[in-house]
């Protein structure tokens, strides 16, 4: 599966955008905003040799990062306003070339999937399908699947969740040390009805990020309880994991 993103954009993102998300993971929003400001200043200088298409794509990536800073650093009552402003900013962003168009549609999907999970704006299946089908099969990279896997799990879309599992499995080379593979594997097992308590325990034992455990408690655990998989051993591991994260500071995966 090929992405239209150039190696130059990927390298730029690693250097300038990843620090923004690292600070968001650590819940250091001031540092995240500073990193975003530096990235925007760097892009405005025009010293990276970007084509107009690459520059437009990168500007959209920065707008998406801005949304996630504000989403992470606002009161629940403010989430709707944060989303509406981000959607308006995104709609006004230029995306004339193929790279910018790809990033535009990816970012739109990212914002609406996040809003659906936050309970701010519902993303019904028919609308999701329209947004997702913009990407032809050969452009549905593991990054695209990472973008949508939360929606697929929340809406129990086993058909596409199976495709996400296969794509991320290939991207991670079935490496259980990699969190994205462990995450989508458990999601797929739960929705398909094939999960066992030992796999849930394994997932919890290897969690390293606060937001991953928060996701587990809010979205996976209720489904586990519905399926009768909350055995004594699972409940004990949930309690131990909760205590472990209560005594550690949030950290970045980068």
Image (tube, helix red, strand yellow):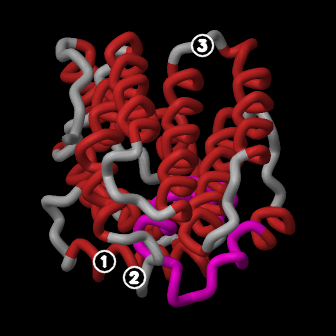
Which one is in front, 128 or 161?
128
User: At 57% from the left edge and 88% from the top edge, which residue is drawn?
Assistant: 137
Q: Which residue is mark 3?
A: 74
Find residue 133 and report its image quarter: bottom right
- Position of 119 compared to 15: left or right? right
- State which mark lies toward you, 2 or 3: 3
Which one is in front, 210 or 172?
172
Query: Which label was assigned to residue 230?
Result: none
- State which mark lies toward you, 3 or 1: 3
Local packing at callout 3 (Cα closer than 10 Å; few below 14, some 14-19, many 20+) is few
User: At 46% from the left edge and 37% from the top edge, which residue is drawn?
Assistant: 44
Q: CA distance from mark 2 to mark 3?
A: 35 Å
Give yes or no for contact between labels 2 and 3 (Cβ–Cβ under 8 Å). no
The image shows residue 105 at horizontal and vertical percentages of 66, 62
Give yes or no for contact between labels 1 and 2 (Cβ–Cβ under 8 Å). yes
User: At 84% from the left edge and 63% from the top edge, which residue is drawn?
Assistant: 127
Q: Which residue is mark 1?
A: 169
- Position of 122 compared to 221: left or right? right
Magenta segment:
131-156
Find residue 106 and report its image quarter: bottom right
Mark 3 / mark 1, whichever is N-terminal = 3
């Amino acid at each position: 599966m090929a992405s239209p993103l150039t190696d130059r954009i990927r390298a730029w993102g690693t250097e300038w955008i990843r620090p923004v998300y690292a600070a968001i993971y650590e819940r250091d929003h001031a540092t995240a905003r500073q990193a975003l400001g530096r990235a925007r200043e760097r892009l405005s200088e025009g010293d990276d040799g970007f084509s107009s298409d690459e520059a437009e794509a990168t500007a959209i990536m920065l707008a998406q990062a801005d949304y996630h800073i504000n989403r992470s650093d606002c009161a629940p009552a403010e989430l709707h306003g944060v989303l509406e402003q981000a959607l308006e900013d995104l709609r006004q962003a230029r995306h004339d070339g193929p790279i910018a168009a790809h990033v535009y549609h990816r970012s739109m999907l990212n914002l609406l999937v996040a809003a659906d999970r936050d309970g701010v704006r519902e993303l019904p299946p028919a609308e999701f399908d329209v947004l997702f089908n913009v990407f032809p099969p050969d452009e549905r990279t593991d990054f695209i699947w990472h973008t949508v896997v939360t929606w697929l799990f929340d809406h129990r879309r086993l058909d596409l969740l199976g495709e996400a599992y296969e794509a991320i499995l290939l991207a991670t080379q079935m490496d259980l040390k990699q969190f994205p593979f462990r995450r989508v594997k458990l999601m797929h097992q739960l929705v398909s009805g094939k999960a066992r308590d030992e796999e849930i325990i394994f997932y919890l034992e290897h969690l390293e990020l606060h937001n991953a455990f928060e996701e587990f408690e809010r979205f996976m655990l209720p489904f586990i309880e519905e399926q009768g998989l909350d055995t004594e051993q699972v409940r004990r591991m949930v309690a131990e994991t909760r205590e472990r994260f209560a005594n550690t500071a949030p950290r970045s995966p980068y």
